[in-house]
Image: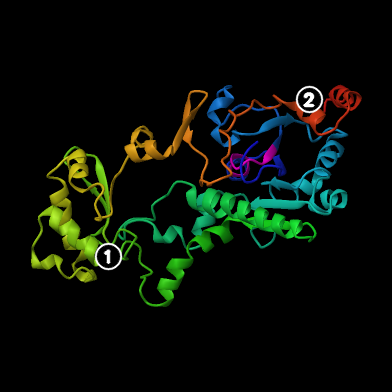
Amino acid sequence: MAGPLSGLKVIEMVGLGPAPFCAMLLADMGAEVIRIDRPRKGFSGQDEARFEILARGRRSLALDLKKPGAAEAVLDLVEQADALIEGFRPGVMERLGLGPDACQARNPRLVYGRMTGWGQHGPLAQAAGHDINYIAISGALHAIGRPDEPPTVPLNYIGDFGGGAMLLAVGVLCALLKVRGGGKGEVVDTAMTDGAALLSAMMYGMKAAGSWSNQRGENLIDGGAHFYGTYACADGKHVAIGSIEPQFYALLLKHCGLDDPAFREQLDQRSWPMLRNRLADVFKTRTRDEWCSLMEGTDICFAPVLDWDEAPRHPHNQARGTFIEIDGVMQPAPAPRFSDSVPDEPMPPARAGEHSEAVLADWGFSRLRINELKERGVL
């Protein structure tokens, strides 16, 4: 495959959400990622694998890891891999005979990427959890929402995907650079709690400097400021405004026809609630498309709030190819972009075990060995 990670060989121990997203990122960039799968249905409950976008770009090898001989087969693959990623609770891979010690005994240069919610150690390491729990103890969840309401439940971008999957990808690539420079393999311990805290670094800095309140909905970029937020339009659709800088704020007032002196003290937090209500009344006088005609493309820092159907059709997204259609399924395209190492379009998501025999053969397993694995019920 083409791409900046072409030639990299990765084993993905298939789990839910964050680990597959990390594997997708690596595969999107040209790495050969093999999914160690098990027979299952797609996340939607449908048999059609094409909807499981996080599984795109990889071949699937289905193994029953509880059968004798399964762990040995994975270890044989590990000998040829650059990295392995897994997202199970601490101790699960060890019980399968596939923990870091076993794998790196077979391949000392292996980068072993681990991702959990709470991390590999700590009082909560063995507890169940989801994104909302991990971002709760990082401080991030407390900061999201209106001041007179409970914290707003965000989509699982912060813990699962930003603080988890992307941090794991960075960690794995950092370790691979070390190995390729002559170092030994690494174990990368990625915790979504750590990642969610890290994503909040700027806010912790602003709080320490006294420029960020511990009360949500009262700050510069948490919806407290009237010049940074979303507004309903006459048609019930919404626009997003981010006019922080004075020159951008001045443009906002100009295009809204606001010359009231009350708006001139932009950073007077005492007046923000009143000014937000005033601005809300202004945005309700036009439809979203009318505001787009007036403001989009200016330095106001403006964008329409688009839904899942509208976003792929926006002219800017179309011009950049931000979305692609694979096997009839609209989805985000690989990112970021590279000037020279342009990745191929990802292959459609595979059914569990769709490539089992082909993967083993390509990774050096003999026909006799493959047949033995089938007879034992491993394959």
User: Residue placed at 55% from the left, 49% from the top?
Assistant: 160
Residue 45 in view: no
User: x%, y% of residue 26?
Assistant: 62, 44
User: x%, y% of residue 333?
Assistant: 49, 38
Q: Which residues are magenta?
A: 25-33
**Left or right: 73, with 189 as reference point:** right
Q: CA distance from mark 1 to mark 2?
A: 59 Å
- Magenta stretch contains residue 9: no
Residue 24 in view: yes
**Left or right: 361, with 175 as reference point:** right
Q: What numbered label is drawn on residue 357?
A: 2
User: Residue placed at 40% from the left, 77% from the top?
Assistant: 209
User: x%, y% of residue 99?
Assistant: 79, 49
User: x%, y% of residue 282?
Assistant: 13, 51
Task: Please tell me in which quadrant of the rendered image residue 29 appears.
Answer: top right
Q: Nearer the viewer, mark 1 or mark 2?
A: 1
**Left or right: 35, with 249 as reference point:** right
Q: Which amino acid type is shown beneath numbered disc 2? A: Glu
How crowded pointer 1 is (Cα within 10 Å; few <14, some 14-19, many 20+) is rated as: few
Element marked by disc 1: loop
**Left or right: 182, with 320 as reference point:** right
Q: Which residue is mark 1?
A: 245
Quarter of the picture holding the C terminus: top right
